[in-house]
Image (tube, rainbow, N blue to C red):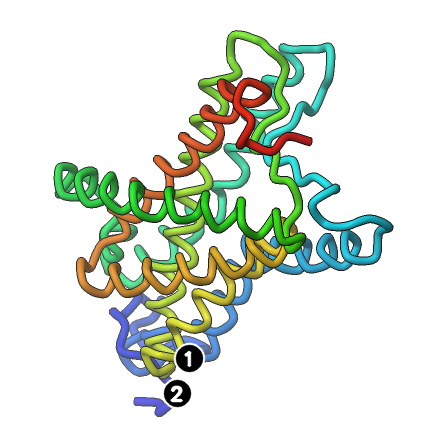
Amino acid sequence: MQSDTSPVADADVPGGGPGPGTGAAGEPSRSILRSETLIVLALSLGASAVSALISFVGSLTKPGGLKHQAATLNGSHAPGRPWLDLAWQLFGIATALVPVVLVAHFLLRERAGGLRAIGFDRRRPGFDLSRGAGLAAVIGGSGLLLYLGARAAGFNLTVVPEALPAVWWKIPVLIASAVQNAVLEEVVVVGYLLRRLGQLGWSPMAALAASALLRGSYHLYQGVGGFVGNMVMGVVFVLLYRRWGRVGPLVAAHALIDTVAFVGYAVLAGHVGWLPTA
């Protein structure tokens, strides 16, 4: 067996022998695993991290403080044309989940059971929802306080969770967007990335740092508060994933946090004094 292989399940190779980039049992080599991981990140949250960095540099170099600038999370794609806007919203949500499908494909190729290998399935819905709800309450509340403090100190932009028109599909789209964010981030940044980094020989601490840093990086467009707060959230999520062995509770928690943020802003913006608006 080649020395440059990882302990993953074998894959069928036509002809019965190892193909290029595989070991004797058809196992993907480390170079293959490394390449596919970079591809997944380049198509998803790695690209988002680069985009967020560019956006943050632009905000820093723009006249005026960060808190006088705004970062809109869910905006209209076709103002004044609600049906076209809805089509763009659904298109964006669906295409953002393509990297998750790619991850599922790679995990199925290992014969690891697809997303079941990282605990994203329907085997334990009660466990996932109960743990997720408790985690959302703790992370969501502390995250809001951190955001308000960072913005008051001038380290964060004003985050506008939604700026959609008052149409019938507004709330459903906001909920769908929250779920999409949760599935994409927890599957890629926690379940898949930790699995691959482990197979590539990274230490548990190095893998935790990489996952948390990536999570913070693609939130950098919000400012320093968004970066630091999401890094801390990343550390907590990795530790809980290792304890529970499932991303299901993390997806549930993340979806609840974003749903409350998006829908709560839609309901409360302009009606309470403590919630900053653009």
Mark 1 is surrounded, within 10 Å at the Cα level, by few (under 14), some (14 to 19) or many (20 or more) other residues, namely many
For residue 75, above or below residue 140: above
Outermost residue on the right side: it is 63
Is 253 left or right of 77, judged from the image as shown? left
Residue 40 screen position, x and y as percent: 51, 58
Residue 125 screen position, x and y as percent: 16, 38
Q: Nearer the viewer, residue 241 or 110?
A: 241
Q: Residue at x 24, y 39 (%)?
A: 133
The image quadrant that residue 51 belongs to is bottom right
Which numbered tag is attached to residue 195? none
The image quadrant that residue 251 belongs to is top left
Q: Residue at label 1?
A: 30
User: The disc labelled 2 sits on which kind of residue?
Assistant: Asp
Residue 231 screen position, x and y as percent: 46, 62
Residue 74 screen position, x and y as percent: 59, 30
For residue 185, above or below residue 165: below
